[in-house]
Image: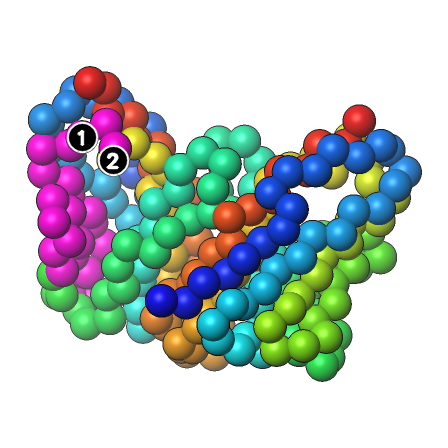
Amino acid sequence: GAVVSQHPSRVICKSGTSVKIECRSLDFQATTMFWYRQFPKQSLMLMATSNEGSKATYEQGVEKDKFLINHASLTLSTLTVTSAHPEDSSFYICSANPLGGGYGYTFGSGTRLTVV
Amino acid sequence: TQLLEQSPQFLSIQEGENLTVYCNSSSVFSSLQWYRQEPGEGPVLLVTVVTGGEVKKLKRLTFQFGDARKDSSLHITAAQPGDTGLYLCAAHNYGQNFVFGPGTRLSVLP
């Protein structure tokens, strides 16, 4: 079945530094990937839609300059949290839609970001 | 904006009990999915339903899509501790992104 690999699974960084999270589709091509943020005991909040070869589409309230998304190939999307602050600490999850349409998402295993 | 509501928000039951969780909306959807998420992991797709009135079974889990394609239920028979997790419904319409519900957090006690 379709697999989405996300790396790293956990990262701790200092305030003011930047962190890059990678999301790869291992056995299918993904022209579109989705980035979510999840706070403890809450549901998923869509941050942005990553489009291969073009600019990402950000949800209202998500800072484009803060959360940089690059989708340079059909199998890799990256999310870079720039100038991280403690309030950016969260669980970040990526997903893709291998079959397209309404067949459901395949999610990565998530990245736990802690900014100290 | 299409919104999904899920109920109950939290549920704690004993092993062996049956339970039903619900996903409701005022909007009609072309498809609906149920996911289970365990702590520290990404959600895992359990099922996709696309036809009004459709019923799908996955071992002890029974999923139903409402006739009007606005709601869905998930019934678990003889719950086990391994069923513990966050159950998320997500719905989709053509040309639009998926919308996720807030989730039902299930705890099955041994």
Specify few, some or many for label 2: CA neighbours under 10 Å numbering under 14, 14-19, or 20 or more.
some
Taking the image as shown, residue A15 lies to the left or right of residue A20, namely: right
User: In terms of secondary structure, where does tag 2 sit?
Assistant: helix
Q: What residue type is labelled 2?
A: Asp
Question: Is B81 in front, or is B91?
Answer: B81
Residue A96's mark? Answer: none
Q: Where in the figure is residue A64, as x and y percent of width and height? A: 79, 59
Q: Mark 1 points at which residue?
A: B80
Q: Which amino acid does label 1 sit on?
A: Gln
Q: Where in the figure is residue A75, as x and y percent of width and height? A: 60, 72
Residue at x 72% of width, y 57% of height = A79
Specify few, some or many for label 1: CA neighbours under 10 Å numbering under 14, 14-19, or 20 or more.
some
Q: Name the residue under label 2.
A: B83
Taking the image as shown, residue B44 lies to the left or right of residue A116, namely: left
Residue at x 37% of width, y 51% of height = B44
**The C terminus of chain B: image quadrant:** top left
Taking the image as shown, residue A77 lies to the left or right of residue B63, namely: right
* Residue B62 belongs to the span the image colors magenta: yes
Span shown in magenta = B56-82
* Residue B3 belongs to the span the image colors magenta: no
| For the residues bearing labels 2 and 1, Cβ distance under 8 angstroms | yes
Q: Which chain carries label 1?
A: B
Q: Are marks 2 and 1 on the same chain?
A: yes
Q: Mark 2 lies on which chain?
A: B
Up-down relation of residue B55 to residue B17 (above or below): below
Residue at x 70% of width, y 38% of height = A11
Q: Where in the figure is residue B35, as x and y percent of width and height? A: 34, 51
Q: How far apart are marks 2 and 1 (CA)?
A: 5 Å
Taking the image as shown, residue B45 lies to the left or right of residue A76, namely: left
Residue at x 29% of width, y 26% of height = B107
